[in-house]
Amino acid sequence: MIANEIRRLWAAGKPVANGWLSTSSPFVAEIMAAQGYDALTVDLQHGFVGYEAATGMLQAMRASGVVPMVRVPWLDPAAIMKALDAGAYGIICPMINTAEEAARLVSYMRYPPEGVRSFGPTRANFSAGADYGLHANGEVVCFAMVETAEAMANLEAIVSTPGLDGVYIGPADLTLGLTGRKYPTGFDREEPEMVEAIRHICDSAHKAGIRAALHCGSPAYAAKAVGWGFDLVTISNDVRLLAGAAQASVSGFRTALGAGSATPAKAAGGY
């Protein structure tokens, strides 16, 4: 089986730079995979992506050598097992609130006797290697998302779950869960109470001997998170990168043209 580069980077004491895919496009996945990320995650929870499209996106990533991961929609054995069968080397599962849920997540990802995963790696046999069934348990990585007040209350039990590789913080939901609508929603939290909560999760994971990951909205914040000790950071996503690049391009054009906010077509009264 092809080794999981995420585990190699961690063993070398290096952080993992993760990209994020929310659009249903193998071509976008292929482009993103060529940009230097260590890992790339297809989002089946909030992204506009279905299973068949996700499989095509995983295929498009293969040539780059980037580690393919999937965020599944929920704690559902069918979704988790099918994502792994399609070739995902890591699973991020949202809304894990208790140690019991974390244990179920681990069990869905591992073949017996370590878990209850059903054998049928339809694509993984080809993409990862014919000996996939012998080595998958030790190669795939399992992240439980900590993003609610309930999860924070059960944090020590969650991070102590046998077989769990790491916790992944969704800062937008975590902020909602801990403070309601006190603050605007978003990723790169600067509020002292949220920074304290985020760093507490990271420290708790490390004390339990597992990894900590954080979803970030900017490269600068991702670098800061690595400085706090995070082992994997997600740096924005395809949608935000496209919007940002398009906005910068149009803004640069407007500035160079010296035409304010109106295009020549609009100034003429139409398109």
Image (cartoon, rainbow, N blue to C red):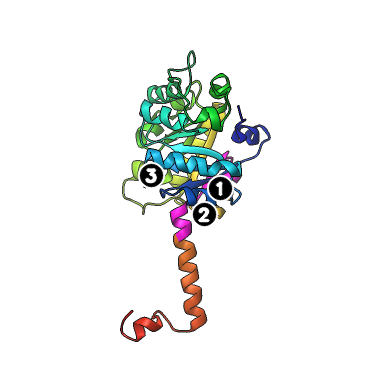
Q: From the viewer's perspective, is residue 114 above or below residue 189?
A: above
Picture quarter with the C terminus? bottom left
Closer to the camera: disc 2 or disc 1?
1
63 drawn magenta: no
- Mark 2–mark 1 distance (CA, rounded to whole Å): 18 Å
Q: Residue at x 58, y 27 (%)?
A: 129
Residue extending farthest bottom = 268
Q: In this rendering, does residue 265 appear at all?
A: yes
| Dot 2 crowding, Cα within 10 Å, few <14, some 14–19, many 20+ | some
What's under tag 1, amino acid-wise?
Ala
| Dot 1 crowding, Cα within 10 Å, few <14, some 14–19, many 20+ | many
Q: Nearer the viewer, residue 159 or 68?
A: 68
Task: Identify the mark at residue 218; answer none if there is no mark.
Answer: 2
Choose top left, top right, bottom left or bottom right for residue 39.
top right
Picture quarter with the N terminus? top right
Task: Write down the region rendered in magenta.
Answer: 224-242
N-term-proximal mark, 2 vs 1: 1
Mark 3: which secondary structure? loop
Write down the residue under mark 3: 49
What's under tag 2, amino acid-wise?
Ser
Mark 2: which secondary structure? loop
225 drawn magenta: yes
Q: Residue at x 47, y 30 (%)?
A: 84
Find residue 167 and report its horizontal and vertical position in percent: 48, 33
Choose top left, top right, bottom left or bottom right for residue 76.
top left
Asked if the residue at tag 1 contacts the one at tag 2, i.e. Cβ–Cβ closer than 8 Å, the answer is no
Q: Nearer the viewer, residue 152 or 226?
A: 226
Residue extending farthest top = 113
What's under tag 3, amino acid-wise?
Val
Task: Identify the mark at residue 33; answer none if there is no mark.
Answer: 1
